[in-house]
Image (spheres, coloured by chain):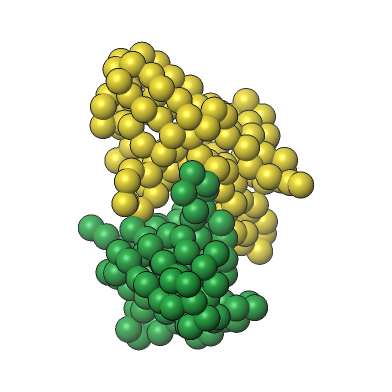
Chain colours: A green, B yellow
């Protein structure tokens, strides 16, 4: 039972254009959402997060949008240099003592020069 | 720089031969996690330590054990590795305060190969 789903295993965008990565979740108890970026042979690196009390959070080139009614979030990256090519994971958690993360299966973003 | 360190980065073991993976952190975080990630799949939480309290996920096989001798170190022991245990093992840390839990920070991972 996949509680966090990233339905696009891969996405290609042209350098300098906007990248939009999508994530859906099924567990209505989730109240905190994160995006991580992962290069090959490295651990995931935290990018940005959003609490369920907000519908948008922005940090530099990264913006995350949350639509609670649709149980959907998206990560917008603008602009996208080739160095952004990586696997992007969506993760979710709910209030508790240690905030265990439930990850999606990831989307491979390829930024084309 | 404060960080999460995993050793070794690559580990090869034989079927059934016990193996231990190591994680250390300089962040002074009170929670340490172990995840298993197989190719093209989501990282899957195996267990975590909240200070000295061990929290096992319900579907983590008994073959996987963990030890946390102090705040800085956490070990993953695989008692009898099978071919299906070949994966990337990720260690992460976070800080839990009265206000909630901070973001999890990950180490670079250990790639385990089982022959």
Which quadrant does the N terminus of chain A fall into? bottom left
State left or right for residue B111 relative to residue B107: left
- Residue A80 in sight here: yes
Closer-to-camera residue (B32/A61):
A61
State left or right for residue B64 relative to residue A2: right
**Could you tell me residue B81's position as x and y percent?**
32, 22
Residue at image coords 49%, 77%: A15
**Could you tell me residue A29's position as x and y percent?**
39, 69
Furthest-right residue in this view: B1
Furthest-front residue in this view: A113
Closer-to-camera residue (B76/B96):
B76
**Could you tell me residue A21's position as x and y percent?**
40, 74
Number of disc labels: 0
Residue at image coords 52%, 46%: A42
Q: Is residue A67 above or below residue A91?
A: below
State left or right for residue B102 relative to residue A96: right
Residue at image coords 49%, 55%: A38
- Residue B75 in sight here: no
Q: Is residue A5 above or below residue B78?
A: below
Residue A7: name its quadrant.
Answer: bottom left
Q: Is residue A81 above or below residue B52?
A: below
Residue at image coords 57%, 60%: A46
Q: Is residue A100 above or below residue B47?
A: below
**Could you tell me residue B77's position as x and y percent?**
45, 24
């Amino acid at each position: 039972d996949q509680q966090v789903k990233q339905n696009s295993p891969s996405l290609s965008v042209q350098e300098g254009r906007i990248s939009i990565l999508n994530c859906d979740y099924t567990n209505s108890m989730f109240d905190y959402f994160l995006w991580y970026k992962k290069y090959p042979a490295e651990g995931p690196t935290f990018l940005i997060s959003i609490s369920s009390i907000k519908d948008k959070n922005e940090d530099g080139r990264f913006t995350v949008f949350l639509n609670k009614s649709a149980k959907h979030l998206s990560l917008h990256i603008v602009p996208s240099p080739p160095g952004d090519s990586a696997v992007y994971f969506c993760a979710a958690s709910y209030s508790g003592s240690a905030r265990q993360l439930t990850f999606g299966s990831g989307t491979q973003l390829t930024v084309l020069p | 720089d404060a960080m999460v360190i995993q050793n070794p980065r690559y580990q090869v073991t034989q079927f059934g031969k016990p193996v231990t993976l190591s994680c250390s952190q300089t962040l002074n975080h009170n929670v340490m996690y172990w995840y298993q990630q197989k190719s093209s799949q989501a990282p899957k939480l195996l267990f975590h330590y909240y200070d000295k309290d061990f929290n096992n996920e319900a579907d983590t096989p008994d073959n996987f054990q963990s030890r946390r001798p102090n705040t800085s170190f956490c070990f993953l022991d695989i008692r009898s590795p099978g071919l299906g245990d070949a994966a990337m093992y990720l260690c992460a840390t976070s800080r839990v305060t009265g206000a909630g839990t901070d973001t999890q920070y990950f180490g670079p991972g250990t790639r385990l190969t089982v022959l």
